[in-house]
Image (cartoon, helix red, strand yellow):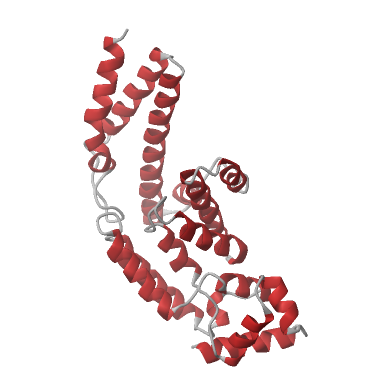
């Protein structure tokens, strides 16, 4: 694998009529590093690979001369295996993804999924490093935006407010999602999966924002507004009590969020008592 990628980098560099020094400067490494890659002595760090591919205008899979269709299928299979356990057993999910990265070094999708199982703030620096590689090198818009989001969260966990704010500034404000449009515009059963996924996302986002607003209003001393947000959050969770589970998720919105109801109820009772 080292020899193949080294030869590929050398071929691509010569096609662009670039020196090793010029390529090294563009990538922020030493020309000795580039020389070692091309000779097969060492391999680029996994977080460098998206940047190398982006510099040459190709995908990471093309950089390794992988069959794009077969790679995509296998990568998604690895990701699905990790998805199934990442909430309950994140360390095992991480191991699955890292084994996948040994097969497909620097793959954008695998790196993006890896970010979901790296604990922050404990390993915030590692998460930021992967995010920086993805925002500078991935060809997928959703992966780039997700990397900016996770980078902002990692900086926030470290108390780096200015860096967090800068990362947030790279995320555009949108008023619709691809899932929403698919659910509305596709036909027949093709609408089912995006509709269920958007329902789940919308419910989670709504509950999260209601609880966040309750925190903000409580900090401001606006008891009635805080109460209204908490009551709405409780009502939204309870509204999904009769929802049915579907194959795309483990449990319903109610299954996922019902354990929060006692704490929300306690907050409501405390604010009502202090009226």
**In the shown orientation, is residue 31 left or right of residue 45?**
right
Q: Is residue 166 left or right of residue 101?
A: right
Question: Residue 97 lies in what quarter of the image?
Answer: bottom left
Q: Is residue 140 visible?
A: no
Q: Nearer the viewer, residue 166 or 211?
A: 166
**Residue 89 x/y as whole percent:** 26, 59
Outermost top residue: 275
In the displayed structure, 27 sits above or below 42; it is above
Q: From the viewer's side, name the closer residue of 34 and 56.
A: 34
Task: Establish if 146 lies above or below 13.
Answer: above
Toward which corner of the image does residue 213 lie, by quadrant?
top left
Rendered residue at 37%/38% (across/down): 203
Q: Is residue 50 above or below residue 83?
A: below
Q: Residue 94's spot in the image, x, y percent?
A: 34, 65
x 27%, y 36%: residue: 240
Quadrant in which the C terminus is drawn:
top left
Residue found 73% across the figure and 86% down from its top: 15
Asked which quadrant contains residue 261, the reply is top left
> Picture coordinates of residue 6 (x, y %)?
59, 88
- Residue 210 percent coordinates (x, y): 40, 29
Residue 58 seen in this snapshot: yes
Q: Is residue 48 left or right of residue 97?
A: right
Instruction: From this view, report whether residue 240 is shown above or below residue 35.
Output: above
Residue at the image position 34 percent from the left and 28 percent from the top: 233
């Amino acid at each position: 694998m080292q020899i193949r990628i080294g030869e590929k980098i050398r071929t691509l560099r010569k096609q662009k009529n670039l020196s090793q020094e010029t390529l090294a400067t563009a990538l922020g490494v030493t020309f000795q590093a580039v020389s070692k890659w091309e000779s097969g002595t060492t391999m680029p760090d996994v977080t460098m690979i998206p940047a190398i591919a982006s510099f040459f205008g190709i995908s990471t899979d093309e950089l390794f001369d992988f069959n794009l269709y077969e790679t995509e299928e296998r990568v998604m299979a690895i990701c699905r295996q990790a998805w199934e356990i990442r909430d309950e057993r994140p360390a095992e999910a991480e191991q699955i993804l890292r084994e996948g990265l040994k097969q497909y070094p620097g793959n954008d999708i695998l790196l993006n999924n890896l970010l979901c199982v790296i604990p922050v703030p404990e390993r915030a620096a590692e998460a930021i490093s992967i995010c920086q590689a993805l925002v500078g090198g991935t060809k997928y818009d959703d992966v780039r935006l997700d990397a900016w989001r996770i980078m902002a969260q990692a900086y926030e966990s470290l108390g780096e407010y200015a860096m967090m704010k800068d990362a947030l500034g790279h995320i555009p404000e949108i008023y619709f999602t691809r899932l929403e449009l698919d659910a509305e515009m596709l036909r027949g059963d093709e609408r089912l999966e995006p509709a269920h996924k958007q329902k789940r996302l919308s419910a989670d986002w709504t509950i999260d924002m209601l609880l966040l607003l309750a925190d903000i209003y409580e900090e401001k001393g606006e008891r009635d507004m805080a109460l209204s947000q908490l009551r709405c959050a409780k009502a939204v969770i309870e509204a999904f009590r009769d929802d049915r589970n579907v194959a795309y998720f483990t449990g319903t919105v109610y299954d996922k969020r019902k354990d929060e109801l006692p704490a929300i109820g306690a907050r409501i009772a405390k604010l009502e008592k202090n009226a």
